[in-house]
Image (tube, rainbow, N blue to C red):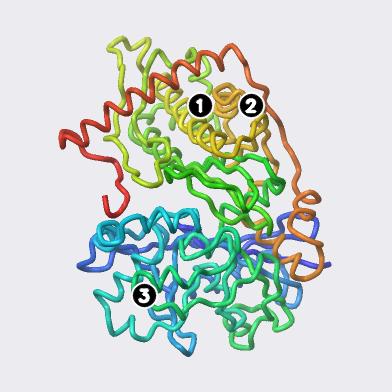
Amino acid sequence: MQYLMAVDAGTGSVRAVIFDIDGNQISSAQYEWTHLEEEGVPNSMSFDFDKNWTLTCKCIKESLESANLSGEDITALSATSMREGIVLYDKDGKELWAVANVDARADKEVRYLKENFAGLEEEFYQESGQTFALGALPRIMWLKNNRPELYSRVANISMIGDWILARLSGVIATDPSNGGTTGIFSLKNRDWMPSMATKVGIKDDIFPKTLEVGTLIGSVTSKAKEETGLSTSTKVVMGGGDVQLGSAGLGVVELGQVAILGGSFWQQIVNIKSDTKIPDDMSIRVNPHVVSDQSQAEGITFFSGLVMRWFRDAFCEMEKLEAKEKGIDTYEVLENKAKKVPVGSYGIMPIFSDSMKYGKWYHAAPSFLNLSIDPEVCNRASMFRSLQENAAIVSSINLDKIKEFTNLEIDEIVFAGGASKGELWSQIVADVTGCRVKIPKVTEATALGAAMAAGVGAGIYENISLAAQKLVVWEKSYEPNMDNHNLYKDIKEKWQSAYEAQLKLVDDSITTSMWKAPGL
């Protein structure tokens, strides 16, 4: 029997997951990790590569033990990671400095680039699909300005998933789907653009080779074998970004396919041709996909899952007790109550994440509008439903923006992540968007996508698309209620007007933004 391993380096944890070649999960091990703010560096999010490598090795060992397998049983492995997080190395391949995905220390550098290189962000966006806010250029510039001795030694760069593969194989490389999120990249050519670094005065000779997802890199080194319990016969294969490999794990591999990933943040993903003209207003992010001739237009909704968790933990102690008594999840209790609330949640409007405005992106102060003092109308059930509706509405707005520049018609959406477990939430997504919503059976889509990559590198699958067609299984689907859809159209328009008014309060320094991109 052949087995494949995926190492998934997420924002909050690292895990190693073992699959058989039919896509069945055999075992997993997971450890939380934290990314601490560097002392004296506001808004920083450092990545501790020494400590985190130890955690990664523990995950690999424990996943093998849990499955009662040895390293020799793992035919191939690959890795995926949070995007935007970068690792810098010296000439000997030793790590020098690393940051996690939403490190925002480089706000001064972002502002400097915007003010001193007029039109450059727009020019780079047309090439890369990325803006400066979470890109690598301002962060490397920060290192040059604040840690010049470290900067002088920088000889290579990779993403965090690539770092895991480099530790295992001794080879530093990247792929388009993850490397593309640095913003120093060409969407069309799917490779680094060192000229971007040259234009802003950053080293332009630090970029490793770019390999497509599923390319064989090498094998586990003797040192990595001792650290992880893997075998030197285990193949190491290029992985990719978590959202893009997660899309493959959901079967979203064909042009025009759409997914909404409902986790802590929500992403709205649409597969497009790699040479598609992207919007001039920088409203939507565009990333290389793990399928070699495709890109992905991506909307992001901040904190949708985290806001729901906050609401549960801040207000729903009774539902928690009820759930414990019944042996079910608290969200299920809340959904059962919210099903009795009519469409529109009695007019309650949550103000949390705005729709995506990638070029100048900030949020209003978190709040609820149109609350009533009637406890029969305004209560935990109606507020809970309003949050579900709002996540779907903002997702729909982001998809509208993507449809506008791609000219694609969307009639079916793959909905995945923790939110897709909710029957009411899934139906609301169908009703708001007017689309059929399909729920995949897989619970570890990102890890499954990385396992597909490993299988391609080992010759088990011909390519990522065919692997997805073979391994992805569907659990259920939801058809939209078009009467509800028409009601939500009006609610969506009113919400957009309300949000603009709330942003004005931030502009006037009356309220405080929930989040602002660096440099604003």
Please count the marks in the image. 3
Circle 3 sits in a helix, a strand or a loop, which is it?
loop
Numbered tag placed on residue 204 in the rendering:
none
- State yes or no: discs 3 and 1 in contact (Cβ < 8 Å): no
Q: Amino acid at mark 2?
A: Cys
Residue found at x 15% / y 33%:
510
Is residue 219 among what the camera can see? yes
Quickly name the residue at label 3.
Answer: 202
Is residue 324 among what the camera can see? no
Of the two numbered discs 2 and 3 on the same chain, state the one appearing first in sequence: 3
Would you say 58 lies left or right of 479 here? left
Circle 2 sits in a helix, a strand or a loop, which is it?
loop
Q: Position of residue 322 (x, y in %)?
A: 47, 27
Residue found at x 55% / y 54%:
287
Quickly name the residue at label 2.
Answer: 435
- Compare residues 237 and 373 and report the one nearer the observer: 237
Placement of the N terminus among the 4 image quadrants: bottom right
Quickly name the residue at label 1.
Answer: 333
Q: Position of residue 291 (x, y in %)?
A: 68, 56
Q: Amino acid at mark 1?
A: Val
Circle 1 sits in a helix, a strand or a loop, which is it?
helix
Comparing labels 2 and 3, the label whose residue is closer to the camera: 3
Quadrant location of residue 301? top left
Q: Position of residue 359 (x, y in %)?
A: 38, 47
Q: Amino acid at mark 3?
A: Ile
Would you say 120 lies left or right of 373 here? right
